[in-house]
Every structure is written in C-alpha cells, then in structure tokens.
C-alpha cells in the first residue's frame, strides 16, 4: 500500500462536555415538559409558536407553497423508497416449524407502535430524509409516526420538508428542533404517544441526546459525520471519481472521503481533478476544508488489498469504479450501502433511487446495516407442545435445572411431567 494523501478519517467520539450538557437538558425537559420545550426552542431557534404542531390547514398551506416540480420529484423519489420497502417486507415471513414430534416453534414480525422521526435542517434543508425513516416505518405497519423538523431560525418551516413529511405518511408534524424535539418524542409529555423508536440525524447535541435516550426507546443508528469510499481501477474516469468524492465532502467539514486506487498514476490524476473541480465548486468553502482535513488517497497493491482496506474502514457509502464489479461485490463485507459501477452515485441513494440513506458510520458497518423496513419490526418467538412432548422435554429440562441448582425452575418441569403421565 502507498499513501498519496493522508487525511484523518474521523470517527464519532464521545465528548464529555457535550454529554454533561445534554444530560442536563434532558433532565430539565423531562421534569418540566412542554414549558421547557418552549423555553429551549425560543433560546436556540427563536421559535415559540402557540402550537408547535401544524394543523391540517397549515400543512396544506405549506404544500401549496411548493413548486409543482418539487411536488412531482418528491413523489418520484418517495415512490422508489416505498416500492423497495414493500419488496423488503415481502421477504420477512412468519415461521412455524415442528422441530421434533409435538414441539412447535415459530416467530412473528410485529411492528412497533410509535416512531419519532426527525428530519434535519441546519446547513441544508434535507427534506429527502423524511422518506427514509417515515416510509419504511409506515410500510412496516407502525400505527403512529410523529415527525419533527427544526424551524428556519425565527422564521418557521421549509415548505418542501413539510410536503415530504406528509407525502411520506407522517401522522403528526411538528416544527421543532434539537434536543427538545427528541425529548418530546421520547417522553410524550402528554402531547404525543411516547416513541418506541427514534430516527433521524442531526448535530452533535442531537446525536448525544439519542445516545442518552436509548433504553427509554429504541434507535435507528448513532451516526457520526458522513463518509464515502471509492475503489477505482485504471478503467475508471478520474473526473467522475473526483466529483463523487467532493459530493460527499460538501456535507460537513468533518465528512470523510477515501479513494483506494490500483495505481499511483490514477491516484495522481484524481488528486489533480479534485483540485481543479474545487476551484469552481459552489460549496468549496465546506468541501475544500473537508477534503483538506479528511480526504485520503491510497494505492493498493492488488484488488484483494483494496477490499481488505475498505473492509477495515467499513465506510458508510462505498462506490465501485472498476471493470470487474462482481469480484468486489462477492468479497466485500463491511459497508453501509454499495454503489456498483459509474452509472450510480451516492447522491442517487441519498435522494431518489429507493435504498435508504440512514446508514452506519464510524466503522459501525462492521456489525450493522442501515435503516430498512425490518428496523421497525420486532421478531418475536413462540412455542407450543403436546402433552407427550412436554413430558419428554420436561425430564431433560428438570435435570438441567437441578445441575444449575435452580430448583424452582426444576419444579415447574416436574409438575408437568407428573401431570401428563410421565414416569421416571
């Protein structure tokens, strides 16, 4: 391996100061409820309307402010997300099997009852995020999805976000941001049903609030700054690779970008292309800092080393710009979502193609995938037995319990053996 550019690949790290600050906020929000929500919304977002929840008339007013093309394009994107979620759901079948005579085991997939979905704002009004948590939840059968999105400071909502939340299927929509939004969704506060799961990304305070609320409710993911890795051989187009790396760099100054190439010549070409494109990139003030501080270019000795490097980094997004895509596809193990061939790009997955963009970061793709319809389902098991099977299993279980000295457990077995006619 040869390193042509070595930028840091920043991982999500716990910040003790942020941890303490968010803990104090959550404690106060839980104690004082809506009064504290209003106070913090006024303080942080200059936003304290009579009601944070939008009425049906206000939702329709927001939709009416959207350009017809925005409405149509949002419908296109959400149609793809919904179709893929429905196809995923079809693979999740109930199970019932008789593992031995008279012993029937099974499982069912049961949706959670209430999901709190946070659609981020901040630097960019990422209304496309609405479909990524709301649609899979509704396809899974979740009864109530409560959607929150932060206000444009002091001014209210972004109309395209409200439209996206409604089209996706949100049952209730609140213009409310930050830790206070997550606290309201998690605790309910007499306003909404307490969420069984929380979904959505945000700044470090939001990420920390989710971490601390885990256990009170479930989470989609704990996400850090976004990441992209590209594996490119000498058949790739260096200008296309450069544009895809910068496409992720514009997210945030802490975004991570990694190029793994198979020759020094290609790596140098890509580096040159990135510098040329940065000169005219409209978001270069962010993307340039991100690439300078976090961009990395390495030359792998062969495809297997390229695969090993990528699997070690376990990137959120991984693009393949290679001739033999099947070789890599068959062997790669650790990534959030894979973009195969130059015809697709991370932006497609983020916005329109139908796969989910809520994905694992900070190497968590080593042990989890991203949000999908199954995230909102509990797979629960059951068992039933004939009397004869209860006798057979009961004798074995009683002996196991006695060996473990759990005698009350053993008695529950012994009484069934006796009841159903078993003899020693």
Image (spheres, helix red, strand yellow):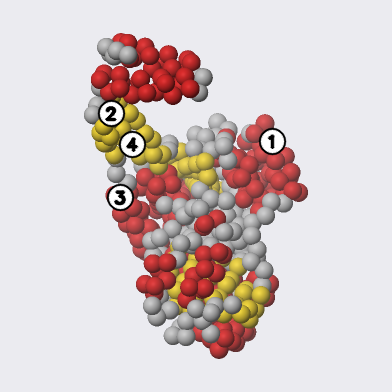
Whole-percent x, y for residue 193 in the image: 50, 34
Q: Compared with residue 107, is residue 77 higher up or lower down, i.e. above or below?
A: below
Whole-percent x, y for residue 174 in the image: 53, 45
Report if residue 324 is visible in the image. yes
Query: Which mark identifies residue 107?
Result: 4
- Residue that protrudes farthest toward the left in the picture: 101
Query: Which mark identifies residue 103?
Result: 2
Depth-wise, is mark 1 or mark 3 nearer the camera?
A: 3
Q: Residues within 10 Å of mark 2 (few under 14, many from 20)?
A: some
Q: Foreground: 35 or 168?
A: 168
Calculate the distance from the C-alpha at mark 1 to the C-alpha at mark 2.
Answer: 48 Å
- Residue that protrudes farthest toward the front in the picture: 424
Contact (CB < 8 A) between labels 1 and 2? no
Report the residue marked by disc 3.
Answer: 91
Calculate the distance from the C-alpha at mark 1 to the C-alpha at mark 3.
Answer: 41 Å
Whole-percent x, y for residue 8 in the image: 67, 69
Calculate the distance from the C-alpha at mark 3 to the C-alpha at mark 4.
Answer: 14 Å
Depth-wise, is mark 3 or mark 4 nearer the camera?
A: 4
Q: Who comes first in sequence, dot 4 or dot 1?
A: 1
Q: Who comes first in sequence, dot 1 or dot 3?
A: 1
Query: Which mark identifies residue 27?
Result: 1
Q: Who comes first in sequence, dot 2 or dot 3?
A: 3
Contact (CB < 8 A) between labels 3 and 4? no
- Residue that protrudes farthest toward the right in the picture: 17
Report if residue 60 is visible in the image. no
SS for tag 3? loop
Q: Quadrant of residue 163?
A: bottom left
Depth-wise, is mark 1 or mark 2 nearer the camera?
A: 2
Q: Who comes first in sequence, dot 3 or dot 4?
A: 3
């Amino acid at each position: 391996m040869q390193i042509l550019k070595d930028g840091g690949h920043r991982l999500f790290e716990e910040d003790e100061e942020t941890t303490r600050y968010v803990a104090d906020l959550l404690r106060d929000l839980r104690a004082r409820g809506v009064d504290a929500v209003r106070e913090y919304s006024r303080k942080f977002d200059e936003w304290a309307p009579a009601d944070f929840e939008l009425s049906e008339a206000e939702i329709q007013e927001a939709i009416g402010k959207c350009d017809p093309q925005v409405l149509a394009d949002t419908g296109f994107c959400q149609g793809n997300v919904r179709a893929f979620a429905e196809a995923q759901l079809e693979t999740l079948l109930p199970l019932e099997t008789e593992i031995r005579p008279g012993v029937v085991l099974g499982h069912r997939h049961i949706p959670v009852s209430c999901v709190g979905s946070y659609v981020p704002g901040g630097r960019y009004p990422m209304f496309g995020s609405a479909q990524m948590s709301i649609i899979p939840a509704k396809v899974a059968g979740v009864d109530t999805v409560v959607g929150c999105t932060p206000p444009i400071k002091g001014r209210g909502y972004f109309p395209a976000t409200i439209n996206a939340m409604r089209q996706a299927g949100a049952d209730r929509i609140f213009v409310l941001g930050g830790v206070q939004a997550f606290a309201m969704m998690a605790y309910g506060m007499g306003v909404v049903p307490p969420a069984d799961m929380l979904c959505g990304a945000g700044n470090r305070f939001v990420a920390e609030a989710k971490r601390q609320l885990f256990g009170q409710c479930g989470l989609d993911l704990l996400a850090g700054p976004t990441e992209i890795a590209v594996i490119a051989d000498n058949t790739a187009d260096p200008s296309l690779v450069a544009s895809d790396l910068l496409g992720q760099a514009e997210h945030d100054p802490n975004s991570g970008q990694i190029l793994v190439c198979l020759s020094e010549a290609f790596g140098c070409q890509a580096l040159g292309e990135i510098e040329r494109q940065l000169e005219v990139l409209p978001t270069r003030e962010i993307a340039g800092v991100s690439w300078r501080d976090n961009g990395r270019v390495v030359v792998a000795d062969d495809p297997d080393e390229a695969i090993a490097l990528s699997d070690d980094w376990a990137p959120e997004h991984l693009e393949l710009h290679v001739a033999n895509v099947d070789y890599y596809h068959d062997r790669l193990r650790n990534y959030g979502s894979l973009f195969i061939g130059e015809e697709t790009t991370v932006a497609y997955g983020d916005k329109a193609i139908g796969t989910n963009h809520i994905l694992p970061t900070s190497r968590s793709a080593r042990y989890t995938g991203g949000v999908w319809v199954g995230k909102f389902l509990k797979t629960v098991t059951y068992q039933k037995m004939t009397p004869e099977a209860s006798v057979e299993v009961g004798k074995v279980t009683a002996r196991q319990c006695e060996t473990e000295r759990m005698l009350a457990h053993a008695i529950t077995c012994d009484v069934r053996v006796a009841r159903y006619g078993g003899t020693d």
